Image (tube, rainbow, N blue to C red):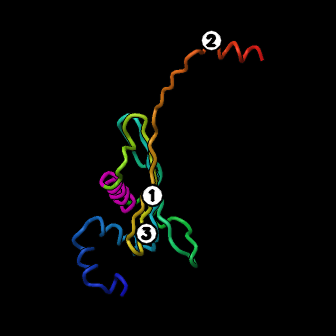
Amino acid sequence: MSKEHNPAWMKRREENSTLRILAEVYDLGGYEIHATFSGSGDSGSIDEMEVKRHADSVVTDSVVNPDNETWSILLSVVDKLIEDHVQHDWYNNEGGGGELVINLENLDMHITGHVYELVREDVRDVEDNLIELMDL
């Protein structure tokens, strides 16, 4: 049964603002939402977001115009999803980032991410090592 004919899905869609905006994008022909995010030094943000649609089983161009209200609301929803669901500390200290992908057909969400780490290594006997290198 498709979501459009599932009463439980329709009820949840009306009650939940996140589902409502995702459903609106889906109704516009959206297939997937891709967002990349990064940060450091105690702040982070979405770098890029794209809504894609199917065209003969090939994901093609953006569906939602970045200049309209739906885009602005969707950006807020994606930002909140990142805030609520990303488990690694991607914006503090040296920072990190990642990608969030939402498949609108089956409402799957996948997050991949990375964190940067500052590593200091002390090298002993630097003078001997440099002299040895210079003799070569």
Between tags 3 and 2, which lies in front?
A: 2
Rendered residue at 37%/71% (across/down): 107
State the residue position of label 1: 66
| Crowd around label 1: few <14 · some 14–19 · many ≥20 (10 Å) | some
How many numbered marks have been drawn onto this rendered protein structure?
A: 3
Report the amino acid beneath label 1: Pro
Of the image marks 3 and 1, the number of the one nearer the N terminus: 1
State the residue position of label 2: 127
Rendered residue at 55%/17% (across/down): 124
Q: Secondary structure at mark 2?
A: helix
Instruction: Give the magenta range.
Output: 70-84
Q: Is residue 80 left or right of residue 94?
A: left
Please name the predominant secondary structure of the magenta segment in the image: helix
Which of these two is toward me, 74 or 108?
108
Which of these two is toward me, 64 or 32?
32
Q: Secondary structure at mark 1?
A: loop
The label number, if any, that marks residue 13 in the structure image: none
The label number, if any, that marks residue 103 in the structure image: 3
Please identify the quadrant where the N terminus is shown. bottom left
Report the amino acid beneath label 3: Asn
Asked whether residue 120 appears in the rendered view, the answer is: yes
